[in-house]
Image (spheres, rainbow, N blue to C red):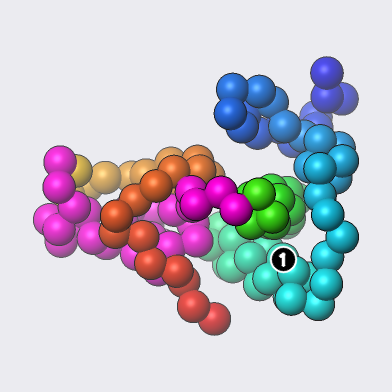
Amino acid sequence: MPAVGARVQVVNGYAMNQADINRQMLPWGDKEISRFLYRAGLFQRRGWLESKAEFMADRLALRDQERDDRRICLECQHIQRSGGCFIAAQGRMPNASKRMQPVTDLLQRCESFEWQKP
């Protein structure tokens, strides 16, 4: 059980905290460190606190190592400052409301996903 106040994310039906991520993580090289710093900065610019941004950047580094093809909406170039999805707002996402406010920290697959580029 994680310590009180520890950041936890549910992954594949079980809670994953920082210690779980650290146990599973392989060593990083310069490329992984650069990617972590970019992601943490991007998430902070998009409104997340530093602790949440760094936790999710770590979680996504593990996702990359596991070759998991799911993404979070906060990594996508279509997410707007308001939290809405630009593709959905344009009516170009089938079966989605134009006012869709996606869960930005949920790993998922989306046909409209496009990487936010530095």
> Relative to 33, does residue 113 appear above or below in the rendering?
above
**In terms of image quadrants, where is residue 81?**
bottom left
Q: Can residue 37 be seen in this view?
A: no
Nearer to us in this view, 27 or 92: 27
Residue sitting at 74 percent across and 69 percent down?
32
> Which range of residues does the magenta coloring cover?
67-95
Which corner quadrant holds the C terminus? bottom right
Q: Is residue 94 magenta?
A: yes
Residue sitting at 78 percent across and 71 percent down?
33
Which corner quadrant holds the N terminus? top right
Which residue reaches farthest front? 67
The chief SS type of the magenta part is loop
Which residue reaches farthest top? 1
The residue to which callout 1 is attached is 36
> Relative to 110, does residue 18 appear above or below in the rendering?
above
Nearer to us in this view, 86 or 48: 86
